[in-house]
Amino acid sequence: MKSIPLLTKLQTFLSEPLDVKLQRSIATDVEAHVLDLFHTVVNSVPAYRQFLQLQGIDPASIQTLAAFQQLPLVTKANYIKQYPLAEICRAGSLSTCDMLAVSSGSTGEPTCWPRQISDELEIATRFEYIFRESFQADRRSTLAVICFALGTWVGGMYTAACCRWLATKGYQIAVITPGNNKTEILRVVQALGGQFEQMVLLGYPPFLKDVVDTGIQQGVRWSDYAVKLVMAGEVFSEEWRLLVGQRLSSTDYYYDSAALFGTADAGVLGHETPLSICIRQFLATHPDAARQLFGESRLPTLVQYDPTSRFFEVHEGTLLFSGDNGVPLIRYHIADTGGVISYETMLQFLQDWGFDPLAVLETDRGVHALPFVYVFGRSQFAISYFGANLYPENIAVGLEQPAIQDWVTGKFVMQIIEDEDGNRFLSVTVELAPGVDAERDKAQSISRAIVAQLRRLNSEFANYVPTEYQQPQITLKPMGDPDFFPVGVKHSYTRSI
């Protein structure tokens, strides 16, 4: 893969129409592209070269996709944390990057992810697909309201940068960045919304719903603003999409919202399209078809992706991807449960169930022959709450405080629960020690201890989750409770809704 000068990449992004870029990607020999990426990373990234050497792998022997798929998996633990930051960057130097983002791990220890403008341009193409194909921002004046947390965390700054690149390319987009300050969001919505043909709110699903509901309570007439939504970080139901859409007076569900599948490690990996939303809504009403397709009764996030940007594989039911970034990654294991479905396989499957999404859409706008990836998330390790990854280790520290540790066994189950209005809350069910009664004062003390430790240990929680949603709801159960803490069964610290 020949190194392309940054100025050339910028000129290509600004001048190349989206349709041309997508058709070029679809026509690319993906196997050759992935092998080219691999050898480029070997030659340009010192850490990856050493990583392979330590495992006795000769990069020159990797000449086929089959050989590529035998390469060792790369993880945070065995790669990112094992080498100096500069060594995992292109040319072994941080000077190849001009921006640093941060993600928080299970202990709150930050992981830095460098990038440069060319990395943003690659991800900006994902946003361009949504803003052009779904929102028609090439012909409608658009206010993009960044509702992700700002600061060192990846979501807000990355999203703002990508939206500005679209404006630079000629899209009728103006960007404003209130972050996750709900009061400021509602202020700018009412002050500026009427001056644009449409408004796009970009943020985590539960937070955006909270913004919408609070606005309604305060008399905001959302129907005046032609609101669209771009969401990331959490799986939501199609019922949730319809509910929020109705409150926004949005009825064109295929084109009025889109979810992103992204990571701090490599930006946006894939995104919803009108086609994928149409398919997901069908599957939501046909659970037997969804179970046959995905192998589970729950409905995952379903997106399309460009395999020349992020190449996906499946390893033991979890996803790997390879892609060029500030930190180039080869067969990077993100521990998300999910799978990959080709465009042709998806349409054939739906045809077998008597469903033609192309006929339902009644237009080819937003329809491109890109493969699909679905993701359930990391439910076995963590839960996602307002886009923040919450880990069992965070909760455990709260239960280990001196005033509390004598009351509990240390076992707990954390989950996100949803009320009748579609609002989500953090729930923690705690196993009491023998002879300890379930008292309200104890539950309140445990809740205060857990939230204090979450704020201390998990910077994503402290900055992503609105204050009014941070206090967990505590339920106390006796030891051996058959529903949550059955005796003789391996304990699970997380549970899906």
Image (cartoon, rainbow, N blue to C red):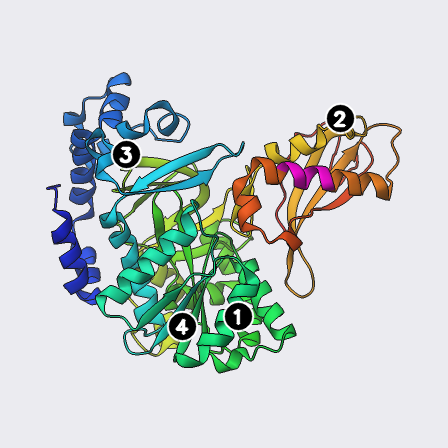
Query: Mark 4 against mark 2, which lies toward the viewer?
Result: 2
Q: List the residue tagged with mark 2.
A: 402
Indicate which disc, 2 or 1, sits on the residue closer to the N terminus.
1
Looking at numbered disc 2 in the image, what kind of residue is underneath it?
Pro
Indicate which disc, 4 or 3, sits on the residue closer to the N terminus.
3
Looking at numbered disc 4 in the image, what kind of residue is underneath it?
Tyr
Q: CA distance from mark 3 to mark 2?
A: 49 Å
Q: In the picture provided, is 348 more to the left or to the right than 286? A: left
> For the N terminus, which image quadrant?
top left
User: Residue 187 got which mark?
Assistant: 1
On the image, the x and y values in percent for residue 103 come to 44, 40
Q: List the residue tagged with mark 4.
A: 255
Residue 136 appearing in the image: yes
Q: List the residue tagged with mark 3.
A: 69
**Nearest the camera: 80 or 279?**
80
**Nearest the camera: 111 or 350?**
111
Q: In the picture provided, is 356 more to the left or to the right than 15? A: right
Q: Who's the residue at 38% across and 36% down the image?
A: 112
Residue 450 within the segment the image draws in magenta: yes
Query: Mark 4 against mark 1, which lies toward the viewer?
Result: 1
Determine crowd level at label 3: few under 14, some 14-19, many 20+ residues with C-alpha closer than 10 A: few
On the image, the x and y values in percent for residue 390 come to 57, 41
The stretch of residues the image draws in magenta is: 448-453
Indicate which disc, 1 or 3, sits on the residue closer to the N terminus.
3
Indicate which disc, 4 or 1, sits on the residue closer to the N terminus.
1
Residue 280 within the segment the image draws in magenta: no
Q: CA distance from mark 1 to mark 3?
A: 51 Å
Secondary structure at numbered mark 3? loop
